[in-house]
Image (cartoon, rainbow, N blue to C red):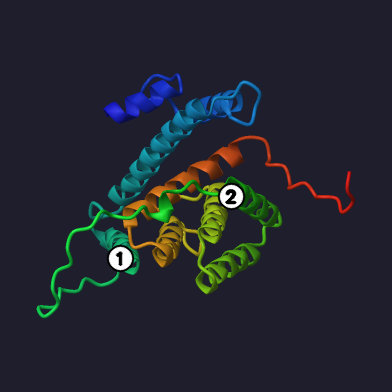
Amino acid sequence: MVADAAAYAVLGLEPGAEWAAVERAYRELIKVHHPDRSGGDAQRATEIIHAYRELKRARETKNALVLVEDEPGGGRGNDWLWATLAVAAVGALVFTLGPLKPPRADRPVAAAREPAADPMDSDPSAALIDAAVRDATRIFRTRDEMALASASRDCHNRLRAEPSLGQLDRCAAFDDAVVMLQDRDPLRSQGPFSELAVTSRQLGAGAILSNDSLAVDSRLDRIRLQVELALAGPPPPPPKETGSGGD
């Protein structure tokens, strides 16, 4: 595919290169171009991450299809898998947009107005995302799955109690960081940090603050990119403690 060829080119590889070569090229390039490093280039780092993400997604999809086709009956016995994925996707969409309701006949149609700027279009909080990545990394190192799930649940409970963009950034970044640290196969993983579970949870959280699903998805994608940058580069430094004394 043309898109795959372009992604390989970004990583300096020939199309069809082995996956080990893709991972090696990604690690080497991101170390050089990471914006937190001297001489780094944020735009180049973004291109590298997007290329790696595209090739990884294509590889996971191909592997999942091979698993299905290898089953007896040409994959017909795995129809439940695709049905589950479809139901989960539709469920996330309905949860985000709400049920469709026809307009009432006795209510006049409002005049067209210039759409207001959506708060989702603002830049995600880098400080909160870095803090969430640190929290996820710290808990992940304990290998305590229950603690990870509890931290995510508490974060989303706070978001529902007091909705804010900052809390959305923190919760989405924490979930994304756990998924990336676990590096699970999105079509086979289960539990609170499967890709389907996280996507549904994040879209539902975004719907609390905005009814524009495209704006929500765009913000979530920008958060995910910042999480990838944080995990790919040197660990984000902890916030500096401010002294109580004056100069």
What is the number of the mark on residue 192? none
Where on the picture, by quarter, is residue 14? top left
Spot occupied by residue 174 in the image (x, y as percentages of width and height): 57, 55
Left or right of 145, for residue 160: left
Left or right of 64, for residue 239: right
Q: What residue do we see at 58% from left, 29% from top?
A: 34
Residue 20 seen in the figure: no
Spot occupied by residue 63 in the image (x, y as percentages of width and height): 37, 43
- SS at badge 2: helix
The amino acid at mark 2 is Ile
Relative to residue 203, is residue 186 depicted above or below? above
Relative to residue 164, is residue 138 depicted above or below? above
Q: Quadrant of the N terminus?
A: top left
**Callout 2: 10 Å neighbours few (<14), some, many (20+)?**
many
Left or right of 5, for residue 151: right
- State the CA–CA distance, disc 1 to disc 2: 26 Å
Q: What residue do we see at 53% from left, 29% from top?
A: 42
- The answer to which of 200 and 189 lies nearer the viewer is 200
Q: Residue furthest left?
A: 105
Q: What residue do we see at 23% from left, 57% from top?
A: 113
**Callout 1: 10 Å neighbours few (<14), some, many (20+)?**
some
Residue named by callout 2? 129
Spot occupied by residue 160 in the image (x, y as percentages of width and height): 50, 71
Callouts 1 and 2 close, C-beta under 8 Å: no
Q: If you read the primary sequence from the N terminus, does the residue marked by circle 1 or circle 2 appear first?
A: 1
- SS at badge 1: helix
Spot occupied by residue 96 in the image (x, y as percentages of width and height): 34, 65
Residue named by callout 1? 97
